[in-house]
Image (tube, rainbow, N blue to C red):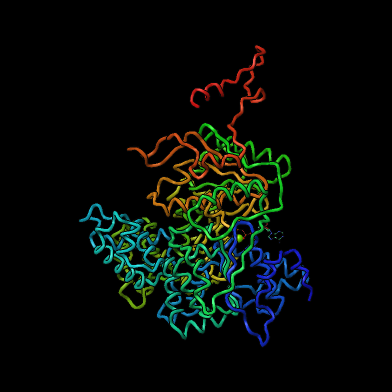
């Protein structure tokens, strides 16, 4: 077989790709860690490794690939497909189609749990709660226990959920988590313990799992030796990208699946660890080699292929100031005379103007919108920019922002599918009954309680008397649930039935019903891409599509569009031009955290992640004033800002420092009638600078 596909790789990458392939007697190689800095080709190497495995006879159905998002996993499968096609031609697509076990830990977890549900005492029809549903359920239990009434300062539902999630994902006891992460809630330890016990009981009674359960149940499953052997035995190879952002529970799962590390490859960069708020721990990657006897092999990569030398030097400068790190500085052959820009502007509106001007200029010289991205620390930072882009008709897609699925009407439709699948799902049931005119919270609760105590909740619903003022709305609702449960019309026609049931309600509830109807039609279209209702619900709940400038939430696939993304969601990606918003103290590092050393260090790594997304040009923008939320009684105010502390004066040599707009004649506002030129705007600005 030709190995031309390996020719482009450097020596270390090739070693990682070929590691342990072709061992005698079908032996599988032991564990391998690839640890290296940004843009050194880790993901690319992993894709080549998967392709090389397949080309050497590995069965793609027995390869498990875990990535950090569904987008990343789709990209990985595409790359593997391309490499195989290069070598084998058309027929390779058939092989890579079988690469079915590629996804996120949560997505893979949900699929495996359905397969093994009966063995672990789960009903395979379980539904999955997103964060909002989980918070609603915790709130319900909180009310039942009476904490919200008697204890007025009891933590909010969101905080309760955050504490619960932290305990589960870090595998640490509640008292320690409270002491270290939520000290202001420590006085409620006893009540929280009771609340969480009630929450777990409610989830079990209702046959629902939350995000954390997907990992927790899977970890429990793989801790049962027989089941672990069975699940682990389904996969010859397990490969994980972005391993630095996994938490304890995820490493437990991985080591449970492959206790000896056979066929296990993990890839990551400790300098890019940015998910500690989800209990990710960089120790997972640092401790990986010693988790095995003999220890795992380690391959490091030190050549960066992504960025130009000036961009890389600036990023290296930022990360060099970190207090602790394992991976070494990178080098690149990509020379350029263009240093990254550090641009001072007056405020966020000016920042938006600067970026739009630059983006259009860059497009003029041949870089499409898709090859450019604007990154920010927190989703709401992009507000003024979104306004400006919309005003100038520049299409954009926003990653990691408000999600399509967060809109009430889309949630209503999904709740119906969920309720039909699992009539014990009370959050879904309550939501739906509240849509019906003439059904108040009390009647909804009564119906749901009847269902909860009945062995057959669906027949309890059918027999439950209609609330007096609900009339036909109640019977229509019950009959829709029945039809869906019976699965008469098959998938994806079911979703059309839900739409027909929902439309009259939509028109009654929302003034902008027409726009929302379009969303639901889009949802139907998305649904048709999934093989079953379960897969659709699971994958959409775990990793919804991103929001776009036309509000429909579905990426504008054919058009050219700009990417707006939080830094967290930009992980692993790259663009020719990258613009970074609000590179000021208070935003980066964010002043919303506790300011602990560990948090500040993580914010530094975030800046490093952001800067290393750029291939050819990088703009860091620092507004002198920016808008913050929650600083005064009304909640919001403008504050004066200074350049981020992560770029101290010693690092300025790596940047081209400038302010914008530069007072040049062509920037001046012309008053041609009198033949004079006067730049009123910059004079006004000068008063404040
Ligand atoms: P990150 O840390 O951001 O996840 P990474 O280490 O995973 O980055 P990749 O995304 O795999 O890096 O690669 C970065 C860029 O370098 C990609 O455009 C990739 O195609 C290119 N690249 C990687 N290896 C090589 C190579 N041997 N020759 C040419 N280009 C390469
Ligand atoms: Mg990568």
At 56% from the left and 37% from the top, the residue drawn is: 352
Q: In this view, does 265 lie to the left or right of 110?
A: right
Q: Quadrant of the N terminus?
A: bottom right
Q: Where is residue 38 in the image (x, y as percent from the top left)?
A: 60, 57
Residue at 42% over, 80% down: 120
Where residue 324 sits: x, y (%)? 49, 57
Q: Front-most of 609 and 430?
A: 609
Q: Nearer the viewer, residue 224 or 653?
A: 653
Q: Which residue is drawn at 30% across and 56% down?
A: 183
Name, please, the residue furthest toward the front. Answer: 650
Residue 678 horizontal/vertical position (percent) = 61, 18
Would you say 637 lies left or right of 31 here?
A: left
In which quarter of the view is residue 6 placed? Answer: bottom right
Q: In this view, does 458 lie to the left or right of 645?
A: left
- Vertical comparison of 387 with 221: above or below: above
Q: Which image quarter has ligand 1? A: bottom right
Up-down: is 495 above or below 318?
below
Could you tell me residue 97's position as x and y percent?
A: 66, 72
User: Can residue 46 be seen?
Assistant: yes
Seen from the viewer's position, the closer of residues 272 and 639 is 272
Q: Is residue 412 left or right of residue 307?
A: left
Which residue is situated farthest in the top direction here?
A: 674
Residue 547 in view, yes or no: no
Q: How many marks?
A: 0
């Amino acid at each position: 077989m030709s190995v031309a596909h390996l020719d482009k790789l450097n020596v270390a990458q090739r070693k990682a790709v070929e590691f342990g392939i072709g061992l005698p007697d079908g032996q599988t190689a032991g564990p391998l860690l690839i640890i290296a800095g940004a843009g050194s080709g880790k993901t690319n190497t992993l894709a080549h490794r998967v392709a090389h495995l397949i080309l050497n006879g590995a069965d793609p159905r027995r390869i498990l690939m875990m990535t950090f998002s569904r987008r990343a996993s789709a990209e990985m499968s595409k790359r593997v497909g391309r490499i195989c096609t290069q070598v084998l031609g058309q027929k390779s697509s058939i092989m890579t189609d079988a690469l079915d076990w590629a996804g996120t830990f949560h997505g893979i977890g949900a699929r495996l749990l359905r397969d093994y549900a009966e063995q672990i005492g789960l009903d395979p029809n379980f539904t999955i709660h997103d964060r909002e549903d989980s918070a609603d359920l915790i709130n319900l239990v909180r009310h039942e226990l009476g904490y919200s009434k008697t204890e007025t300062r009891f933590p909010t539902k969101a905080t309760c959920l955050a504490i619960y999630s932290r305990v589960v994902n870090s595998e640490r006891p509640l008292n320690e988590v409270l002491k270290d992460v939520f000290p202001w809630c420590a006085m409620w330890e006893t009540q929280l313990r009771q609340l969480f016990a009630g929450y777990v009981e409610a989830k079990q009674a209702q046959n629902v799992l939350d995000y954390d359960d997907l990992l927790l149940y899977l970890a429990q499953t793989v801790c049962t030796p027989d089941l672990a052997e069975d699940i682990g035995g389904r996969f010859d190879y397990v490969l994980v990208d972005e391993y630095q952002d996994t938490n304890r529970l995820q490493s437990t799962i991985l080591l449970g699946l492959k206790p000896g590390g056979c066929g296990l490859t993990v890839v990551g960069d400790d300098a890019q660890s940015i998910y500690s708020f989800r209990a990710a721990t960089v120790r997972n990657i640092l401790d990986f080699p010693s988790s095995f006897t003999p220890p795992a092999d380690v391959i490091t990569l030190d050549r960066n292929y992504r960025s130009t030398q000036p961009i890389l030097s600036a990023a290296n400068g930022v990360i060099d100031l970190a207090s602790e790190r394992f991976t070494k500085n990178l080098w690149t052959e990509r020379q350029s005379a263009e240093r990254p820009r550090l641009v001072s502007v007056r405020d966020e509106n000016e920042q938006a103007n600067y970026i739009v001007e630059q983006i259009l200029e860059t497009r003029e010289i041949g870089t499409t919108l898709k090859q450019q991205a604007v990154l920010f620390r927190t989703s709401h930072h992009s507000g003024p920019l979104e306004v400006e882009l919309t005003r100038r008709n520049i299409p954009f897609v926003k990653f990691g922002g408000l999600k399509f699925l967060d809109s009430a009407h889309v949630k209503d439709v999904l709740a119906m599918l969920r309720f039909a699948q699992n009539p014990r799902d009370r959050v879904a049931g309550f939501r739906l009954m509240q849509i019906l005119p003439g059904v108040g919270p009390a009647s909804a609760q009564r119906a749901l309680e009847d269902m909860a105590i009945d062995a057959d909740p669906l027949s309890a619903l059918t027999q439950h008397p209609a609330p007096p003022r609900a009339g036909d709305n109640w019977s229509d609702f019950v009959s829709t649930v029945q039809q869906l449960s019976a699965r008469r019309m098959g998938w994806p026609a079911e979703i059309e039935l839900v739409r027909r049931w929902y439309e009259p309600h939509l028109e009654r509830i929302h003034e902008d019903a027409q726009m929302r109807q379009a969303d639901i039609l889009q949802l139907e279209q998305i649904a048709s891409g999934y093989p079953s209702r379960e897969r659709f619900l699971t994958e959409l709940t775990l990793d919804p599509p991103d929001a776009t400038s036309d509000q429909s939430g579905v990426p504008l696939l054919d058009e050219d569009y700009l990417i707006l993304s939080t830094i967290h969601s930009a992980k692993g990606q790259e663009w020719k031009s990258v613009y970074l918003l609000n590179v000021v103290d208070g935003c980066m590092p964010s002043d919303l955290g506790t300011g602990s050393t560990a948090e500040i260090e993580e914010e530094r790594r975030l800046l490093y992640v952001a800067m290393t997304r750029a291939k050819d040009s990088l703009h860091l923008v620092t507004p002198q004033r920016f808008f913050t939320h929650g600083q005064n009684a009304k909640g919001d105010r403008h504050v004066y800002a200074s350049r981020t502390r992560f770029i101290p004066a010693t690092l300025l040599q790596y940047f081209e420092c400038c302010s914008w707009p530069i007072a040049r004649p062509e920037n001046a506002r012309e008053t041609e009638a009198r033949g004079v030129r006067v730049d009123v705007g910059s004079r006004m600005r000068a008063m404040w600078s």
